[in-house]
Image (spheres, grey):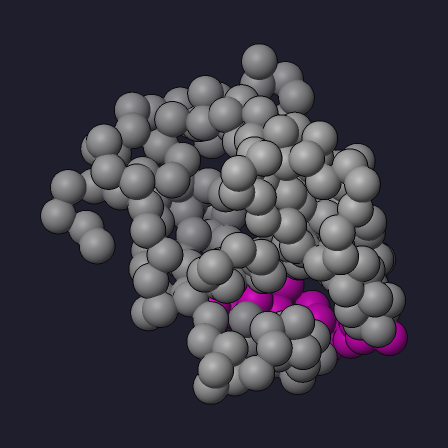
Amino acid sequence: MSSEFKYVPERGRPLSNRTAELVVRGQYHKFMLIPPMEHHTRWFDAGPVSIGVEARALGNEDHMIRGPSIHVFDSAHDKEFVRFDIFGDVLHYHYVLADNDHNIVWGYDPDTNGPMLDWAINALRERLPTMLRKAGAEDKAREVEQQGWDASVLEDVRAEAVKALRPRPDDLERSREGMAWMAKWKDAHPQFNTVEEGEI
């Protein structure tokens, strides 16, 4: 089952029967995020980092969400550092603490900050080393600062993300596929999307 994923954290019991809920403030989660579905992800290599735009869809006939996840990985596409999830009712982003198999999630407020896609592109352009450090990737942040990175890919990243927001004829099929992918990840990594008792 887990052979479909490049990497699966050490298997453990769910932290509780409670499901993690998104909050506006940063919340530390002791689980790893679901990996991107490669065949729905377009990669933009930018030197020491690569940015993947995944066209996601989740749900069923009665309620379905679609939109992009923008993934910031190393150049080998092996280790994720930051993820922007621009879909659903609660827009959010993650610092991915890959060395611990954990993440920190922050909710996004579009009323204050404007459209999240514009904000995410600007954050990548202006604050990538800072965000890498927040994800615990000091060496990668220093590499970006010293070597630079190809920020010219960001307009293509934006265009691909805009495409992922549009309705497509295969939305329902992709949403079912997305839910099945999530179930497979939950089976491989039972801690996924759970929090310990007493956490908020």
Q: Is residue 38 left or right of residue 141?
A: right
User: Which residue is the extreme one toward the left?
Assistant: 198
Q: Is residue 74 visible?
A: no
Relative to 7, does residue 110 appear above or below in the rendering?
below
Q: Is residue 28 visible?
A: yes
| Of 190 and 110, the residue lying toward us | 110
Q: Position of residue 118 (x, y in %)?
A: 67, 78
Residue at x 35% of width, y 69% of height: 24
Magenta span:
132-152
Q: Position of residue 140 (x, y in %)?
A: 63, 63
Residue at x 75% of width, y 61% of height: 161
Relative to 189, does residue 119 appear above or below in the rendering?
below
Q: Position of residue 158 (x, y in %)?
A: 78, 69
How many numbered discs sit on the rendered protein? 0
Residue at x 19% of width, y 50% of height: 199
Quadrant where the C terminus is found in the figure:
bottom left
User: Which residue is the extreme one toward the top?
Assistant: 1
Q: Is residue 18 left or right of residue 143?
A: left
Residue at x 36% of width, y 56% of height: 22
Q: Is residue 13 left or right of residue 89?
A: left
Quadrant where the N terminus is found in the figure:
top right
Main secondary-structure element of the magenta-colored stretch? helix
- Whether residue 135 is in magenta: the answer is yes
Relative to 41, does residue 138 appear above or below in the rendering?
below
| Of 86 and 148, the residue lying toward us | 86
- Whether residue 22 is in magenta: the answer is no
Q: Position of residue 96 (x, y in %)?
A: 50, 54
